[in-house]
Amino acid sequence: MSIIDKVKEAAMNQFIEVIEWLDNSQDTLLYRFPVAGQEIKNGAQLIVRESQAAVFVFEGQVADVFTPGRYTVEGGNTPILTKLGAWKYGFNSPIKSEVYFVNTKQFTDMKWGTSNPIMLRDEDFGIVRLRSFGAYSLRVVDPSEFIRQIAGTNAHFQTEDIDGQLKRAIVTEFSDALGELKIPALDLAAQYKEIGEQIRAKINEDFKAYGLEVTKFYVENVSLPPEVEAAMDKRASMGALGDANRYMQFQAADALRDAAQNEGGGAGLGAGLGAGFAVGGQMANAFGAGPQGQGGSAPAATATCPSCGKANAFGAKFCADCGAKMEVAKVPCVKCGAQLREGAKFCSECGSTQEKQKCANCQAELAPGAKFCAECGTKTEQ
């Protein structure tokens, strides 16, 4: 050691009379005061500010904790001296001790989140995977226990040094709380505050052993997988649908509008209107909200026999009246290719007539959609 260093050390030992810490950071939990040789001059002043605690460590053990105030380190009026054992020397020698300042303020806006989805059983959607994130506030409530269990001999301890451990504990308690509460996924948003309070109570049971306390815990969001969100959107759409009869009227109005814009004219109008009522009727049957009979209950769905025209139970394979097969062969529309019932005269999609056309000049059969006769070249009316 050079002469200059020795002079500096001697000066520091001689003139360290005030022990205090001004925190310029926003995330420091613990700070060890730099005492040269760990020697504190007899009669030194200790200043502990609000939201601070000063902890004296002597020979590796926590000797005493000082709350906010001003203290004089000398014989007789400082409790720590009776624990350090320096009194027997008459305080002529400096007191050897480490001094730690612990920040007891609240550290706010600390973030947490689930790195992997949480598997849960939901009464509406079965097994779902949830992700969540939020924020919490933390403070040191027992400085001596915090030094023993967490900080140790670190000269500078920050929130990031313990952030990972805290997040893992939070996610574990969060998963456990959701499993115990058994709140349906659709109702989670209305229970954020209750979930946060329950999780905070569980976390503090663990953090108490570290000398820490979570003062606030916020659940900002709980998100579902995209496929579950899509199912929720469909359910919301079904709820917005309301009365199926009104939906059927709406479908019919749409069919009228589309048919009016169709080149098929009146034929398209009739076919489109029929299709609109057919779709609306199917929706009414599906929702159990078809036209109400005199008895107040919806009539059973029926299907018309293609042979005799009698009504049969929906889904019957053979007619109960004539025995004919209920299934009707499908043929493509001559214009748009849509699948139609065999024998249909007009397309229910585009309204085009399905009857074969003949040339007005030579009576030759025209191909579907032909604009000129293939035999004589006469322009067709299609």
Image: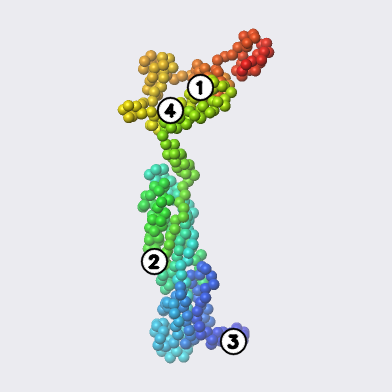
Q: Is residue 225 above or below residue 110?
A: above
- First along the sequence among labels 3 and 1: 3
Gap in angstroms between the C-alphas marked 2 and 4: 65 Å
- First along the sequence among labels 4 and 1: 1
Give the residue pinned by disc 2: 208
Dot 1: within a 10 Å radius of its alpha carbon, few (fewer than 14), some, or many (20 or more) residues?
some
Gap in angstroms between the C-alphas marked 3 and 4: 100 Å
Q: Secondary structure at mark 1?
A: helix
Frontmost residue, 310 versus 165: 310
Gap in angstroms between the C-alphas marked 3 and 2: 46 Å
Give the residue pinned by disc 1: 270
Gap in angstroms between the C-alphas marked 3 and 1: 109 Å
Residue at horizontal 67%, vertical 13%? 378
Frontmost residue, 186 versus 38: 186
Residue 240 location, quadrant: top left
Q: Nearer the viewer, mark 3 or mark 4?
A: 4
Question: Label 1 amino acid?
Answer: Gly
Q: Is residue 196 left or right of residue 350?
A: left
Q: Which mark is residue 299?
A: none
Residue at horizontal 41%, vertical 82%? 80
Give the residue pinned by disc 4: 281
Q: Secondary structure at mark 3?
A: helix
Give the residue pinned by disc 3: 7
